[in-house]
Amino acid sequence: MLILKAQKGSREALGRLWDKITPKLFGYLINVTKNEALAEDVLQNTWLKAIEALPRFETRGISPSAWLFAIAKNECREHWRKTARETDLNLEEHDKAADDSLNFEDKFLIEKILADLSEEDRELIRLRYIADLPVNDIARILNINFVAVRVRLHRALVRARNNIVAKKLTT
Amino acid sequence: MNNRKKTINDLLGEWGEKQCRLPAKNDLIKSAVLAKFNPSTAELKRIKHRIPWLSLAFAGLAILVFVTSSISVPKTFAPQPAAQNESGSGFVAQPQALNSFGSGDSILKYWPKAESPISDNREFLKKDYNAAVRTREVNELTGRIETIVRGMSGRVDSSSRSEKSGYVSFAIPVGRLESFRAEIKSLVWEKFYTEQIYTQNLLPQKQSIEEQQKQAEKNLSQLKPDRDALIGAHNRTLISIQTQLQAIVDQLSVLQSATTTDPAAQARIAENIQELINESVRVKTLLATENRDYQTKLGNLDSQIKSAEDNVDNVKKQDQNLLDNVATIQGTISLSWISIWEILDLYLPGSLIGWVFTLAAIIAYIWNRRRSQLII
C-alpha cells in the first residue's frame, strides 16, 4: 500500500499517490469551485494538510482517496467560510475545462442533468462519478448512513433520468 | 444513435472520467508539496495515536456502576399481600410475611400446628394468590382485571384505583385459577408481572375435624341406648308399681265388701284397710318419685343428646367450611404505574446507568475514531 509506505517516510510512494489521486481530486475541485486557480490552491492545501496528518492516518475502514476527498471538502468549506460566499453554478465556466471528446449531445445532457439537481445531489454525483468512490466512503465523507447515500444517489439518478426524458419529449 | 442506448449511469461515468485531469501547474505544485514532506518526522509521528480519553472515562464509569450494582440488592418488584385497613375504609396493600397473607388466616390460625403422619396422604390444598403488575395504564387495567374476575365466576371483594396505583382483592373458584393466571399474564409483558402463590395442605385441620366428628358421633351413639334403657327401666318400674297398686285396690275392695258383725273382725278389717291405704300412699309416693326421677334423667339425657347432635352438626359445618375454603382462591393484585426509565431498567441486566455510560463510551470511541480518520 502506497499510503503505508508514505507513512514510513517514502517520498516516492507519496509521489505515486499524488499521481494516482490528483487527477480525480483536481477534477472534483474544478467542478466544485468552478475556478482553476482556486482549485489549484485548494489542491495544494489539501495535500499539505494530508502530509501533516499522514502519521495519524489509519487505514481501518477508509481508503486514502476518501481521506483526501474529505480533507479537500473541508478545505473548500473553510475557503467559503472565509470568503463568505458561494459561487452559483455556471455551466459554461463549469465545463470549460472539460475534455471536448465528450460528444455534444452527451455534454448537453450532462449540463442539463447537473443544472436541474440540488447542490447535495451534485455533490453525491461528483463523489461517485468524478472521485469514483464507493458508497461506504461517500457515506464517511458526507457523515451519513451508507443506505442513505444509496437511496439519495438512486433518487438523484431517477430525477436526472426523468428530466432527460421530459426534455426530450418537449424538444 | 448509439448514445440513445446509454444509461444515465454510463453517461455520468463517462463524464466523471472526462473530468479527471491534472492541474496545469502540476509539477510545480507536486514538487512544492513533496518538499514539505519530512520522512523522518512521518515515522515518528505515526506511533502517536489519539487516545480516546472520553471513551475511556465513560467505560470506567460504566464498570464502576456495574460493579457497584452487582454487590447491591437485585432489582425486583414483589406482589404485596392484602390486609384489611383497620380504619374500615377498605383494603390497602401492605407487605406481610410470606406465611400470613390473605383470608386463609381466618381458618388457619384457629388450629394448633399439627403434624400428620405420612400414612395419610390426602391433600386439602388451600391456595392464596397475590400478584403485582406494572403498567402505564393503571386505571384501564384495574377495570379489566375486575371484569376477568367476574368472568371467572368470582367476586371482587374490594378494589381501588388511581392514576398511579390500583388494587383488586377478589375470590375465584380453585378450578379457574390457571385460566385466570393466564389471562392476567396476557395483559402485560412478562417482566411487568410477578406473582406469589401460597399453598398449604389443611390436612391437620381436616384430621382434627374428623376426630371431633368421630367423638361427637360416638357420644351420640352412647347416649341413645342410655335413653332407651332409662325408658325401659322406667316402664318396668311403672308396671311393678301399678301391679302393687292394683293389688292394694283389689285387697281394699275385698276388705271393704266384707260384712261381719264381729267387732274384733271389724277392727281387724279396719286395721287392714288402714294398712292398705297407707301402703297405697307409699306406693303412689314411690310412683311419683319414680316419675319425677325419670323425667329428670330423661330430660338430662335428651339435653345431652341434643348437645351431641348439635356438636355433630357443628363439626359437619366446619368440615364443609374447610372444603369450601379449599375450593376458594383468595387473591389480590396490586398495580403500579411504570416509567420508561423503569421499563428499560427491568429489561436490561445490571444497572441502567451503567448501560448509558457504556453507550456513551461506544459513541465517544466511534466519534474519536472518525475524528482521527477524517477531521484534519
Image (spheres, coloured by chain):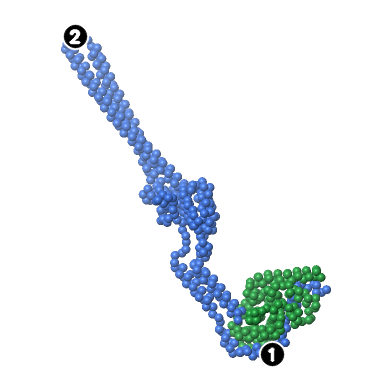
**Mark 2, residues whose alpha carbon is within 10 Å: few (<14), some, or many (≥20)?**
few
Q: Please give left or right for residue B299 compared with residue B132 in the image.
A: left
What residue is at 41 percent from the left and 41 percent from the top?
B317
Q: Quadrant of the C terminus of chain B?
A: bottom right
**Which-is-in-front pick, marks 1 and 2?**
1
Q: Please give left or right for residue A134 compared with residue B116 in the image.
A: right
User: SS class of the residue under badge 2?
Assistant: loop
Q: Hey, what amino acid is under mark 1?
A: Leu
**Mark 1, residues whose alpha carbon is within 10 Å: few (<14), some, or many (≥20)?**
few
Q: Residue furthest left?
A: B264
Q: CA distance from mark 1 to mark 2?
A: 194 Å
User: SS class of the residue under badge 1?
Assistant: helix
Residue that label 1 marks = B28
What residue is at 76 percent from the left and 74 percent from the top?
A112
Q: Hey, what amino acid is under mark 2?
A: Thr
Task: Pick the residue in front: B266 or B107.
Answer: B107
Residue that label 2 marks = B261
Colour chain A is painted in: green
Image position, residue B149 (x, y; %): 51, 49
* Chain shaded blue: B
Vertical relation: B267 (above or below) A10? above
* Res A84 quadrant in image: bottom right
